[in-house]
Image (cartoon, helix red, strand yellow):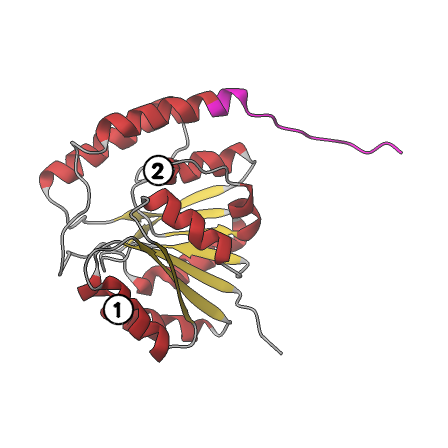
Amino acid sequence: MITLPDISVVIPIYNEAENIFLLTEELTAVLPKLKKPWEVIFVDDGSTDASLRALEAVSDRWASVRVIGFENNRGQTAAFAAGFSRARGEIIITMDGDLQNDPADIPKLLEKIGTCDLVCGRRQKRNDGFVRRLSSRIANRIRNRFLGDGISDVGCSLKSFRREYVEKLKLYNGMHRFFPALVQMEGGRIVEIPVNHRPRKYGRAKYNIGNRAVRAFVDLLAVCWMKKRHLSLNIKEYY
């Protein structure tokens, strides 16, 4: 008899070959302590380095690690969507594959998910350069001004979702930046908690201000339109 996992951890990977084994070691040290069935789903987003070979190696070593992916780079939203479609847990955790998110924070996410539908990490003492921190702060303020989702660090990928709200997400390219607003549209309860943020050891960031600012603002306008037009159906059955 196959035991389905209670917890699924979904991690997009794009050219993170040097980080994969270290991250898997940390995850496989933390997750068994939860004393619940778990799985890790790595989504290879068309990596061009040795990431896929590293993913195959960790999947061979740890039975609870699964690997899926794309032939070509499709972007972070597509990678999350692919992972969500294969996740079997009732609680789905998302995180980055660059070792900056700390797996030791996963138990804190799970503690809070008992009283809400989405727990968002808020990175404390961010270990990023000044330009990235400043651009993130400006982007979060603009997003909050338009959407009012109350989240101060939407760029932190470390989150935990109830499965039913993942299944309700309507995802398009770039929508991973707006997970809190999309969950709120569906009536979900959201909380933000402080989490650790570590310096990057290997590799480099895959995006910067120049390649995301305009696109992110266009996506923000799209989500504002979705929020304005969203149908909330509170149906009562009389007979």
The image quadrant that residue 101 belongs to is: bottom left
Q: Is residue 205 left or right of residue 147?
A: left
Q: Secondary structure at mark 1?
A: helix
Q: Extreme front residue here?
A: 71
For the N terminus, the image quarter is: bottom right
The reply, left or right, for residue 53 in relation to residue 222 is left
Q: Is residue 229 magenta?
A: yes
- Write the start and end of the magenta stretch as one range: 226-239
Residue 230 rendering spot, x and y as whole percentages: 55, 25
Q: Position of residue 201 (x, y in %)?
A: 13, 61
Q: Earlier in the sequence, mark 2 or mark 1?
A: 1
Residue at x 29%, y 74% (from the top left corner): 57
Q: Which residue is mark 1?
A: 53
Q: How many marks?
A: 2
* Residue 141 appears in the rendering: no
Q: Using the numbered discs, state the Cα–Cα distance from disc 2 to disc 1 in whole angstroms.
A: 29 Å
Dot in front, 2 or 1: 1
Question: Is 108 or 231 nearer to us in this picture?
Answer: 231
Marker disc for residue 177? 2
Q: Is residue 87 above or below residue 33?
A: above
In percent of the image, x 38 and y 45: which residue is there? 78
Q: Magenta: predominant secondary structure element?
A: loop
Residue type at mark 1? Arg
- Inspect this view and state whether residue 107 appears: yes
